[in-house]
Amino acid sequence: MTDQPMGAERTEAQSLAQSLEQYQACLEKTFDLANKDYWAQYLEVSKHQTGIAKTYLWVAMLLLGLYGSGYTRFRFDLEGHFFPYITFAIAIAGAAGAFVVCLYAIPGRNGYREIASPSWGALNHQAYDLAASRNTDIYRIFLQDLITAVDEAVAHNLETNTKRAKFLRLTSWLLISSTGSAILCLIYMYGCLN
């Protein structure tokens, strides 16, 4: 009778050890995925958004240049017409506004957060404290804390990228409205001149 509980106890201990090994493997996999997500938010999304912003800046400057040369060419033809002045002013304001909003969006106002906040030393110190307390689950606890740190950094970086994306979306709408207003002005002037 005493052998049976001991055998059951060993089986239970083996089952627990196997479960802890599987849990540790899951933590390692979770950390790998969280780390990939962090670098995607930190580098790839930011690089993509910055590339789009540069394109928007070029388009805004191109439109402002076209509007400037168009005004010097057609300013005498605009005299006596109210509608072209308004649409032309809206076009210039849209392009200038797009340029300013895009410049404001590029830096990412919230900034990007590093994984180890405030430093990597804090995580190492925590692991040392666990070792000093003779804790047997140091690696698993360290992985949990590291995953939490990565997750918090990803959430912060996602918020930064989301805010930048909203500004870039506003920039695109300003450029579209600017171009549309300029086209309306040209259509009206073409109708008046012919």
Image (tube, rainbow, N blue to C red):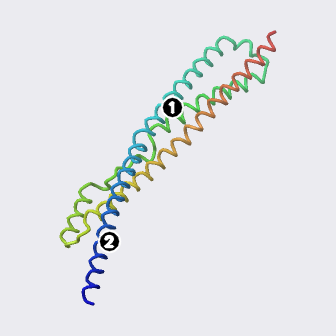
Q: Which residue lies at the image location 74% right of the left edge and 12% below the top edge?
A: 77
The relative height of residue 149 versus residue 91 in the rendered view (above or below) is below
The relative height of residue 69 versus residue 119 in the rendered view (above or below) is above
Q: Which residue lies at the image location 55% right of the left edge and 40% below the top edge?
A: 167
Q: Quadrant of residue 190?
A: top right
Outermost residue, bottom direction?
Answer: 1
Q: CA distance from mark 2 to mark 1?
A: 53 Å
The relative height of residue 109 versus residue 72 in the rendered view (above or below) is below
Q: Amino acid at mark 2?
A: Ser
Residue 1 locus on image (x, y percent): 27, 90
Q: Which residue is mark 1?
A: 52
Q: Nearer the viewer, residue 187 or 138?
A: 138
Residue 55 locus on image (x, y percent): 51, 27
Q: Which residue lies at the image location 52% right of the left edge and 34% below the top edge?
A: 102
Q: Which residue is mark 2?
A: 15
Q: Amino acid at mark 1?
A: Ile
